[in-house]
Amino acid sequence: MYSLGEAPYAGEGGVDTIKKIEDGYRLPRPNMCSETTYDMMTRCWYYNPKDRPTFRILKDFFTSDYSNLNELVSFENIE
């Protein structure tokens, strides 16, 4: 969304991309993305899934920025 559909690792092969990620590389913050949102994005990229934010946390986070989110998306039974 913030990169306007640009391919994240354009021109790189899958093996090279995986190696970069395993070495700790993460995509830089897009210009249109706030520091707060980028921080939440990077938390979603944590290696251990248990360390990543839950859908409930993401819903609460983005609802504060996008007041009509509850109208756009159904949030039944998310944890």
Image (cartoon, helix red, strand yellow):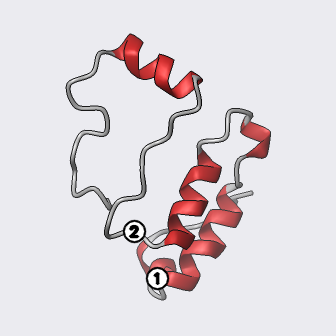
* Quadrant of the snapshot with the N terminus: bottom left
Q: Residue furthest top?
A: 15
Q: Which residue is drawn at 45% across and 73% down?
A: 34
Question: Circle 2: is it few (<14), some (14-19), or many (20+) Cα within 10 Å?
Answer: some
When asked about the image quadrant of residue 24, the answer is top right
Placement of the C terminus among the 4 image quadrants: bottom right
The vertical placement of 27 against 66, above or below, is above
**What is the number of the mark on residue 33?**
2
Residue that label 1 marks? 66
Q: Earlier in the sequence, mark 2 or mark 1?
A: 2
**Hey, what amino acid is under mark 1?**
Tyr
Res. 72 image quadrant: bottom left
Query: Which SS class for mark 2?
Result: loop
Which amino acid lies under the numbered mark 2 shown in the image of this protein? Cys
Q: Is mark 1 on a helix, strand or loop?
A: loop
| Residue furthest right as drawn | 50
Q: Is residue 76 visible?
A: no
Q: Is residue 22 left or right of residue 57?
A: left
Q: Where is residue 63 in the image (x, y as percent from the top left)?
A: 56, 79
Mark 2 → mark 1, Cα distance in angstroms: 14 Å
